[in-house]
Amino acid sequence: MKFRPNYGMPQAIVVDDVEYNKQIKKNSLYYANIIVWTVMFLYPLLSILDFIYANSIFQELFLVKIITILLIYVVYDLSRRTGRSINISLHTTFFLISANAALVCNVVSFEVAPVFFLVYSSLFMLFNLAVFWPAVNSFAQLLSTLIMLSIGYHAINQVTLETYLSQGAGLFIMIGFFSCFIPLARYGIIMNNTLNGLKIQNTTTQLYALHLELMDKNNQIEHSNAKLGELVIQQDSFLALVRSDIQQFVISLKDLSGRIDEERITKGDQASECVEGINANIASLQQLTEIFPDQQNTLASDIQIDLTWIDIYQCIQTMVNLMKAEFDQKDIVFQWISSGGKELIPLDRIYFDQVLYNLFANALKHSDNKNAIYAEVVKNNLKTELVLSCAPKDVNFPLHKDTLKSKTPTVQSLKRGLGPGFYVARLITEKMGGKLTYDQGQQHVSYTLKFKSEIA
């Protein structure tokens, strides 16, 4: 499963209908198994009541219960083998227990009939407490039970209807009717819980996929940073060698220049030789400058940029919140010079966060305590500039920022106050089609990020 996050946009959690129906069927089978097996194991125990309250017909009632259990098991086994709906077993169980109730409550003596009415009404209620199906099925079973009770009353019982109702039938009808509303609420609750469970499961899957993607992205960043770090080390070593060579050439040129001054009058030929030596050294210097590495060709070719529209205000505020502990440690505050509502720029979110982190970390590393970091977004034609500045709090930088800016351009090189963090940020910025510059004044330092406002 490939999940690509869209930053700033909520992801809809979609549950497949097939998966949802499969889970509903699984829940229905689970609760049906509980009811059927509970009835088959516990219903014969009601013979104890038959033995106590209807001893004269105890054996006949026990035989009826055994036959009922066998019929329930046969229907359940056939439904399971043929793959039919489990509701067939539930309806069979409910119907046979209701038939038992209609028979037993009409054949026992008048004095003990309330006991059996109470027992079977309790079974009816417990059944509705555990069953998972639409409530219309429970009302249909109640109707069939009342029909069988009515048939049994007219065929077997000799008491009046008022007496029959007062001796337990009325209580049975009331409990049965109100218990039919239990599946109405239970069915909806289980359906919602199932849907929410699938949503949570899908969300977990998406989060895990996002976690794997972020880990992969993080590995790419670490790999890129390692290569960029090696590049910085190689550049430092190369520049050190170049500096040594240039110093040797300069010393040689100075020596030749002195010899020319001393002997230019008396030895014209030798002076010409010195001039030729100077020209040779100059040619060597030119060759040396030609083999300097071109910075535009040093960008890591394996950095994969995925441009999406992101809000730079939100990105900066998120980074400030993440680095709040570091700010508090050096008593540094963050302040917007001008903050708009939203500014969408086509950038790679992961690498832009990396650039912001490097710049903030660089500013923290080379700033004094009790300084302030200012941020400003400037819209200029088709380009957007983000300026991060660090200055003392008492300077009132937002008011005097134009006068504090250095008159001459600051040399963009790896020197004190910048370091590899700035260099890595500059390489990533240029890879995203932007430009990162550094400005240093007497009382402030500024980092300026320039990006295009549209995707080329």
Image (spheres, grey):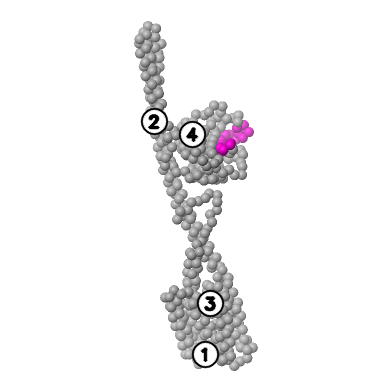
Tags 1 and 3 touching, CB below 8 Å? no
Residue 279 in view: yes
Which disc is residue 340 wearing? none
Tags 1 and 4 touching, CB below 8 Å? no
Please state, as top left, top right, bottom left or bottom right, where the N terminus lies in the image: bottom left
Circle nearer the N terminus (2, 3): 3
Numbered disc in front, either 1 or 4 = 4
View extreme (right): residue:
162
Which disc is residue 54 wearing? 1
Graded by Cα atoms within 10 Å as few (under 14), some (14 to 19) or many (20 or more), the crowding at tag 4 reads some
Which residue is nearer to you in this view: 352 or 369? 352
Q: Measured from the top left, where is residue 379 in percent x and y?
A: 59, 38
Q: CA distance from mark 1 to mark 3?
A: 25 Å
Q: Which residues are the magenta region?
A: 380-401
Circle nearer the N terminus (2, 4): 2
Q: The residue under label 3 is which amino acid type?
A: Phe
Which disc is residue 418 wearing? 4
Q: The residue under label 2 is which amino acid type?
A: Phe
Q: CA distance from mark 4 to mark 3?
A: 76 Å
Q: Residue at x 61, y 80 (%)?
A: 174
Q: CA distance from mark 1 to mark 2?
A: 107 Å
Does the segment drawn in magenta span residue 332? no
In the rendered image, the vertical position of residue 61 relative to residue 329, given as above or below? below
Graded by Cα atoms within 10 Å as few (under 14), some (14 to 19) or many (20 or more), the crowding at tag 3 reads many
Tags 2 and 4 touching, CB below 8 Å? no
View extreme (top): residue:
266
